[in-house]
Image (tube, grey):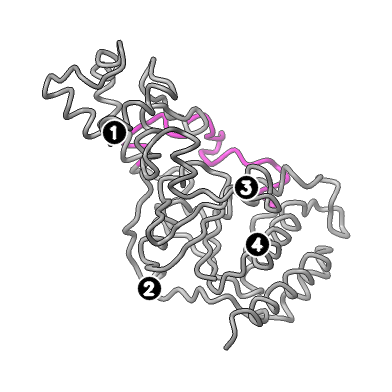
Amino acid sequence: MGLMLLDTPSLYFRAFFGVPESVTAPDGTPVNAVRGLIDMIARLVTDRGPDRLVCCMDADWRPQFRVAALPSYKAHRVAADGGDQVPDTLGPQLPLIDAVLDAAGLARLGVPGYEADDVIGTLTARAGAPVDIVTGDRDLFQLVDDRVPVHVLYTARGVRNLQVMGEQEVAAKYGIPGRGYADYATLRGDPSDGLPGVPGVGDKTAATLITRFGSVEDVLAALDAGRTDGFPPGSRAKLAAAREYLAAAGTVVRVVTDITGPALDDLDDRLPATPRDPAALSALAEKWGLDGPVTRLRSALSRGSERSGP
């Protein structure tokens, strides 16, 4: 029950690499990402029973406000045309994913200038109710909150074997306060996003600093105050040398939680019992060889409606 937010790009990339490209439409076009994503959603609805669901999208995979703060942000992923390096056989499947989600009646939301993570952060902040965030991206661990609760359903082991991450699980895995992941990641860095971290500060030192001081801001305040207690040996000089990076990195690492606009205000995130456009969904299924996944999705939506009641 409650609200489920899908980090849709994370899921369709996982589907693309997890389902063979030999899975094609009748005309030979690869549809492995589409099939995999539809089956993931059907499985999540069946197993977790949300009554609200949003497929969150990247309207901007590398927002300018993050690049301005830290030019290295995702710079290694920029293609020759300036876009993201999407595999050649995945790109053509993305419009089909949109079409299937829309015909099924699943809420789909991307906001110009923001990543899916920011949409997720904003919808989580607005929810005021239990939230399950489905992603393979550890960055979203920063949103866990046992008070609401907000959990991340982490897909590293697959949708059938989700790791449910709350504050206790994050604390146990990384040795940090449960809601301290963003500060921990800022110090440690993340090469996959072009986030360098503080040179010479690894997982253990980052965890020690966040545990002792609470946040990057508090670490810097302790440096400014001339404190020497609480700093692992050698870390003060490394942190002082990285002040410029630390001042900018928060803008990159922290997801936005206060996007505004009519797209959010008018969002209907109720899980549909039946497809919004059954004829269009059937036509897409027939043209692209998606009968099996679409049938499973229809069945999952119907069962979800029966569970949630009128």
* Marked residue nearer the N-terminal end (1 or 4): 4
Residue occupied by mark 4: 44
Task: Give percent across and percent down for residue 7.
Answer: 54, 54
Instruction: Looking at the image, tell me whether mark 4 or mark 2 is earlier in sequence order.
Output: 4
Report the residue marked by disc 1: 248
- Give the mark, 2 or 1, whose residue is nearer the N terminus: 1
Segment colored magenta: 66-92
Q: What is the C-alpha distance between the residues marked 2 and 3?
A: 29 Å
Q: Earlier in the sequence, mark 2 or mark 3?
A: 3
**Distance CA(mark 2)–CA(mark 1):** 30 Å
Q: Quick one: label 2, few (<14), some, or many (20+) residues within 10 Å?
A: few
Residue 95 as seen in the image, left or right of residue 294: left
Q: Which residue type carries mark 3?
A: Thr
Q: In this rendering, would 260 be left or right of 276?
A: left
Residue at horizontal 83 percent and vertical 68 percent from the top: 291
Q: Quadrant of the N terminus?
A: bottom right
Q: Amino acid at mark 2?
A: Asp
Q: Where residue 223 appears, x then y in whole percent? A: 18, 22
- Amino acid of disc 1: Ala
> Residue 77: within the magenta?
yes
Closer mark to the observer between disc 1 and disc 3: 3
Element class at badge 1: helix
- Whether label 4 touches label 2, CB < 8 Å: no
- Residue denoted by label 2: 265
Q: Which one is closest to the eye, mark 4 or mark 2? A: 4
Spot occupied by residue 38 in the image (x, y as percentages of width and height): 71, 62
